């Protein structure tokens, strides 16, 4: 299979995003759940990437759970989990689990070949009313799970759709 350049991948993602905006903008207007948005976008991505499988919240590598080493934001959450354990033995179990199994992850959308290690593209998406940044997570996906491309997509919600223009594609779709 030939290797795609970032420019071609970007064109395909923009094409899918345009289809999403044209056909499903109602989901943005009503501020639908992020999972609803990513599911619909994934349907259009499947159209423009027919040679791959496109999945939402997919957490498998071959038949094993998809795990990565913790990153900053996840480390803060794990630290709180450790602090909530009342005994040394409970803390030890939490740490052993992390060190042995890593951290289970569920990327918003992935484009890949199921049942293989071919992790082509991973997408994390957020709505404009969510200030959370998943770029560090995307970096870890590329590093630990060997995705060729990692992309952050932002969905314009809460009246942002009206002011969304052609120029906003550059800000809404970022490659890392």
Image: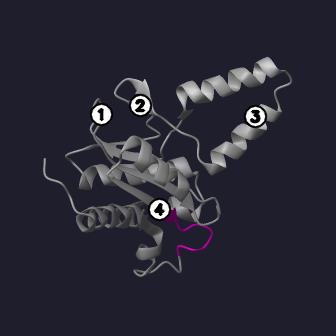
Q: Label 2: state its secondary structure.
A: strand
Task: Please check the rendered image and state whether residue 141 is part of the magenta-colored stretch, yes or no.
Answer: no
Residue occupying image coordinates x 47% and y 62%? 153
Within 10 Å of the Cα at label 4, are there few (<14), some (14-19), or many (20+) other Cα atoms? many
CB contact under 8 Å: marks 2 and 1: yes
Q: Name the residue under label 3.
A: 81
The CA span between labels 3 and 4 is 29 Å
Q: Earlier in the sequence, mark 2 or mark 4?
A: 2
**In-image side of 15 versus 66 (left or right):** left
In this rendering, which labeled residue sits more in front, label 2 or label 4?
2
Q: Which of marks 3 and 4 is nearer the N terminus?
A: 3
Q: Mark 1 points at which residue?
A: 114
Q: Earlier in the sequence, mark 3 or mark 1?
A: 3
100 or 17, which lies in front?
100
CB contact under 8 Å: marks 3 and 2: no
What's the magenta region? 154-161
């Amino acid at each position: 299979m030939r290797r795609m350049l970032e420019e071609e991948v970007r064109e395909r993602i923009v094409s899918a995003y345009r289809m999403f905006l044209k056909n499903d903008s109602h989901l943005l207007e009503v501020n639908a759940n992020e999972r609803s948005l990513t599911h619909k976008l994934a349907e259009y991505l499947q159209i423009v990437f027919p040679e791959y499988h496109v999945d939402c919240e997919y957490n498998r590598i071959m038949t094993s759970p998809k795990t990565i080493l913790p990153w900053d934001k996840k480390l803060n959450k794990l630290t709180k989990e450790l602090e909530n354990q009342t005994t040394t033995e409970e803390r030890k179990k939490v740490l052993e689990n992390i060190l042995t199994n890593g951290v289970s992850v569920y990327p918003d959308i992935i484009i890949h070949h199921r049942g293989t290690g071919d992790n082509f593209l991973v997408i994390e998406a957020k709505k404009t009313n969510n200030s959370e940044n998943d770029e560090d997570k995307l970096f870890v996906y590329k590093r630990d799970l060997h995705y060729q491309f990692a992309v952050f997509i932002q969905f314009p919600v809460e009246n942002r759709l009206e002011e969304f223009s052609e120029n906003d594609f550059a800000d809404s779709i970022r490659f890392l």
